[in-house]
Amino acid sequence: MEPAPPVSRSLPPAPSSASPRPASGGSAGTPRLGWLDALRGIAALLVAVEHSSYSFMAEFRERLMPELNVGRYGVMVFFLVSGYVIPASLERRGSIRAFWTGRAFRIYPLWAAVVGSAVALNLLGVAHLGARFDGRDPVTVAAAHVTLLQELLGTPSVVLVLWTLSYELAFYLLVVALFTVRLHRRPAAVSVVLGALAAVSAVVAFVPTASALSSAVGTGTLVALASVALVLAVRCGSSATSALRVPGALAGGLLALVLVSFNGTVPLWEGLLILAVMFLGTAVQRAESGESSWPRVARTAVVVLICAVGSAYGYGDTAHFARRGWITAFLLAVLTFGAALALRHRRFPRALIWLGTVSYSVYLVHPVLLAVSDGVIGRCRHDSPVLEAAFFAVLLPLCALSHRFVEVPGLARGRERIRRIRST
């Protein structure tokens, strides 16, 4: 699933931003911060492995997925990292305008390159976006994607993994709203409330259907209204005047809650749990920095875990949802994050640190490379570890290039723009 410079110049697939400053000592690249990059690297690899298994390891995937949803495992790790990093990034800057500027320059350069490449390859017949966009207004699709909220606006993502960015942006909007009204110091309470709401929504008789708002008012109308609301929320919320800043920030938070609750494509309980997980990551950062207590974080984690498992059981198995595989993935994600946190003062393997550095590229680029592979050589009927290894042998150098020539220049321009903001 944000990304001012990340831990060691890295960023998550759902971009996570600059790492918070260490509570005592340490600097970018030290063991204290390297654990976040290592987590990003692991998460990116898990998501890429899960998606590549469709093409090269179908038999293995069919046996594994009912037991462990590898993609959700990676994505939940990303969401925990984002929750740990993003609010600290906002508070470190102390400027909502600088925060949004950093996010934009972190996310959009690579996003534009990947989306543009996917569309171009589709037009050339090399890769196929499928029938998901048949009959859809291209202007509406484009506008929804530019907001990054397409997954919450009833519009399929051009690149499937972009769905996590919609939930990342919803989290940003909520964090900014809480920061503006000075409620950002209580992430544990927010996480518990969201987790409890998720558990309730999983078992109640009536919950909104997928994309309920889009069905009610029309996708085009919703995209137009949400786009205007988002622009106003960001612009007004970044204002130096409290008369504009407070209503703007609160409107953005409300927009996020409404879209996640009434227009998500994942079940409502999972959408709320995603937000709960990110605020759990924030609660961990608060304790690690000495602003909260570890017992409080432990209690919060237990409540969220119970709500997550209970929600999955209440939702039950469906044609597209393996309950046991999802629960195993969720528990492993929390355990992985906890293990890395416990080892945060140790040095992590350089390979994982590097993989974390290019994790945003790995996350966005791998689906495009897979689409090209599927279009050119097709999918394997039987497991082919050789082709799986060959895919990563091509993917990782490609991601190193996209990081160097797309992400790094974007981050540099973002830092320069933030310096100008601070000097005015």
Image: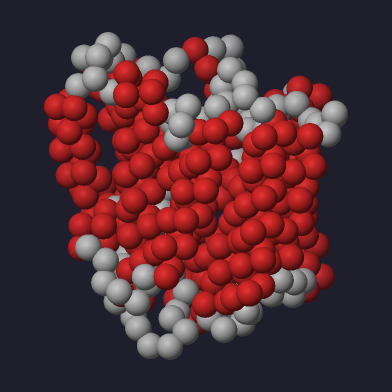
Q: Kindly indicate the quadrant of the structure image that contains residue 203.
A: top right
Residue at 66% x, 54% y: name it: 304
Q: Is residue 52 above or below residue 26?
A: above
Residue at 41% x, 63% y: name it: 339
Residue at 38% x, 39% y: name it: 47
**Residue 419 place in picture, x, y as percent:** 44, 76
Q: Is residue 294 above or below residue 281?
A: below
Q: Residue furthest bottom?
A: 24
Question: In this view of the protein, can residue 325 be seen by the observer?
Answer: yes
Q: Kindly indicate the quadrant of the structure image that contains residue 129.
A: top left
Question: In this view of the protein, can residue 230 be seen by the observer?
Answer: no
Q: Is residue 141 left or right of residue 41?
A: right
Q: Is residue 133 above or below residue 171?
A: above
Residue at 47% x, 50% y: name it: 333
**Residue 260 place in picture, x, y as percent:** 70, 42
Q: Is residue 112 left or right of residue 272?
A: left
- Report the number of discs: 0
Identify which residue, 366 or 139, lies in the foreground: 366
**Residue 123 place in picture, x, y as percent:** 36, 18
Q: Kindly indicate the quadrant of the structure image that contains residue 49.
A: top left
Q: How is the image coloured?
A: secondary structure
Quadrant location, the C terminus: bottom right
